[in-house]
Image: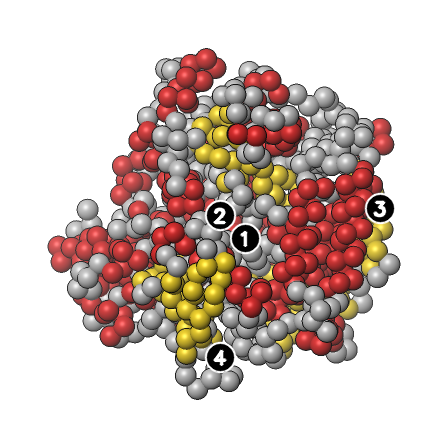
Amino acid sequence: MEVKLRILRYNPETDSKPHYEVYAIEAEENDQILDLLNRVKWYQDGTLSYRRSCAHGVCGSDAVRINGVNRLACKVLVKDVGRKVTVEPLLGLRVIKDLIVDMEPFFDHYKSVIPYFVNDEPAPARERLQSPEERARFDDTTKCILCAACTTSCPSFWASGEYVGPAAVVQAHRFIYDSRDRAGAERLELLNDRVGVWRCHDIYNCTNACPREIEVTKAVGEVKLAIATGRIE
Amino acid sequence: MQHQFEVVIVGGGGAGLMAALTASKGASTAVLSKLYPVRSHTGAAQGGVGAALGSEEEDRPEWHTYDTVKGSDYLGDQDAIEFMCAQAVETVYELEHIGLPFNRTAEGRIAQRPFGGHTNNETGKPVRRAAYAADRTGHMILQTLYQQCIKQKVNFFDEFQVLDLLISKGAACGVIAVELATGELHTFHAKAVIFATGGWGRVWEITSNAHSYTGDGVAVTLRRGIPAEDMEFFQFHPTGIYRMGILITEGVRGEGGVLVNNDGERFMERYAPTAKDLASRDVISRAMYLEMRDGRGINGKRYLYLDVRPDTVNKYARSDGRTWPDGSPYQISGADIMSKLPDIIDFCRTYMGVDPVTQPMPVQPTAHYAMGGIPTTMYGEVVIDDKNTLMPGLFAAGETACVSVHGANRLGTNSLLDIIVFGKHSGLRAAEYANQSTYLPLPAEPEGFVREQLEALRNADGSELAVDLRKEMQDIMFADVGVFRTEEGMSAALEKVKELKQRFRNVRAKDPSRIFNTDILEAWELGCLLDLAHVTARSALERKESRGAHARDDYPERDDVNWLKHSLAYLDDKGVSLKYKPVTMTRFEPKKRVY
């Protein structure tokens, strides 16, 4: 079948503003949208620029807006979206070229929440023990691949790029609820900031956008509750 | 622009980040990665990391060593294998100590699952040796190492693609990289350079590997006169999603899944009576090839079923007499599958519309892992000839390196082990080396060779498309330098690749811009793939025996008298030339390999 692929293009070296271009592409219904982008780039227009790597939804490179919602281009198939497909860069981050956005502000927010394991107690010769139940407590938020689909779907983030955004909260959650970690209180204090979790208004765009099916809004809610009650449960 | 760091690491996957953690404690260190490090292909590894922790049942590093030697079809260097398997235990505990969220046993220890080729050496039965985090162990390793690099304030140059290695007075002294965001070339002046650029599965049509797995590190070093070792050995993983190649972890079979042909037969019982579906990957991929060749693919097509439905698993677990560690019969439910293999279920639903809990998965062998690569010692030092001469200042680790611990066939879980053990030790050794040395002068016009390559791509006549050449290479390499090989096929592939390299001169980058010119870089990567295909086909053609992943119809047996040796391939304008060096043997005499 033929698919009409409408792509928001922008080349900073020649364009004053972004514009749409439409490409007619032969496709099968099980093709990924990433396959279509590749076909445009390889056969029709080598200047089309986007990020991609693993092509099966685990590296997080190709988060874009497909028909208005944030998705990984390699996890959406033609049969999911039909014959008219619009692909645009993520919102809320500066567009560098075509579908490539500036990820630095996103990673800066990530780095601001102590996104690493902290425990200065002497480690045992073998592993620190953790029960399967304790491990399960933070399982969901370990799945995050930092693709930015959640943060760039969030109206609060669109309103102000100062907000750390749901992805950073998810990362903090992964450690706050890890029974072995010791910096939970410090992270909660950071997230209690004016640019922290209180910017979240339970809109659920993040949960809907997550390609890893993480319950993002729930995780943010648990962090809010922990701040409010002073208890990590 | 010019930068100076004592240690420059090329690649931000598991090996590169592990090296960064150790090197940066002793020397100024930078990591250059063509992707954001968390996008690296380590994150796609699923099933587990091998270590004889003995969390679930008795296990010993010596058993792990023997299994790896046997798995390598005796081509692995036994001193290095023993080192890796001994280091495995403490290194996996180190990962736990820095936060890696492994699954847990009821006692709170790191959970372990069985994997192909890993056995209790006394009973010959599969042993639970793969420490895992659901079916995203690689993701958790990559995330944990990146997090710790952030904590340790490692210097990252993200989206900097390395295009050349600088050599001065016979020693490595830096690299040239292009900054994707600006197109600017940067010179990194270094005392030590570590290549950790991963594999090159994109040489083949069906692959589990990322688009960015184009073997840049090996291509760059080949062009600077450094050989590539054992390139004829490339692993085809038995279970890739039909036509797409996406990996379905061996952990599926570890949890009790079985391979089934069109007659509904669990055919591995015929090929590997003891280990069955948990035999080595080369053994299973060959069995699948033969089943499909003889018309027992599903509906006569080129795929088979991988069946992990609870009824199937429980039926065969009963007939195999499989038990839990406490001796009770092994039985699982759909919920167990869901909790232990969530990503696999997601892949199958997303890409095939198949639910593995109720339907079998269509699978075929998929190009997966390079056993060969840049020759190194067990400390990551790069070896440049058959006398084990080192190139000062040059190191390599992970899939891009050939230590060699995987020999002719890698066991599942040993790739994640390889990156953490050899990443760690190459980082330590590189920092140590840097502390004892001074910066060598850079060569004149350090960017010259890179500019020449990029100019050629900008100025070619454009009569060939990169995509066409890539596809022709991938098709012939999959058909003729794949799971089964013939003299005729390998010769044809070699001639074809040479022809493609000629035609590559007519490939022109269509994008003239500087900012994020992924067009010219994809074309440059195709040049890397062609060089690797060339070296692979030639190394394969010359090896006149069958061993591990290298199986040919005219020499169907392993030949230890003539071929118990590593190949070293050199590439220059005239083509590929080969040398050989002996395998290091310590405790294990080669025996016939039976599973």
Nearest to the observer: residue B350 or residue B447: B350
CA gap between label 1 and label 2 equals: 9 Å
Q: Which mark is residue B184?
A: none
Chain of the residue displaying label 4: A
Seen at 41% across and 79% down, the residue is A18
Closest to the camera, between mark 3 and mark 4, is 4
Name the N-terminal-most of marks 1 and 2: 2
- Tag nearer the camera, 1 or 2: 1
Q: Are discs 1 and 2 less than 8 Å apart at CB? A: yes
**Residue identified by numbered label 4:** A11
- Residue B16 screen position, x and y as percent: 56, 56
Q: Which residue is mark 3?
A: B579
Q: Are marks 2 and 3 on the same chain?
A: yes
Count of numbered circles on the image? 4
Which label was assigned to residue B210? 1
To which quarter of the image does residue B180 belong?
bottom right
**Mark 3 → mark 4, Cα distance in angstroms:** 49 Å
- Contact between marks 3 and 4 (CB within 8 A): the answer is no
* Labels 2 and 3: the sequence-earlier one: 2
Label 1: chain? B
Residue extending furthest toward the front:
A1
Report whether A176 appears left or right of B183.
left
Disc 1 to disc 3, C-alpha distance: 31 Å
Confirm whether circles 2 and 4 share one chain: no
Pick the front one: B486 or B144 = B486
Amino acid type of the residue tagged 1 in the rendering: Ala
Position of the N terminus of chain B by quadrant: bottom right
Q: Position of residue B178 (x, y in %)?
A: 60, 72
Which element is circle 4 on? Answer: loop
Query: What is the quadrant of the C terminus of chain B in the image?
Result: top right
Between circles 4 and 1, the one closer to the viewer is: 4
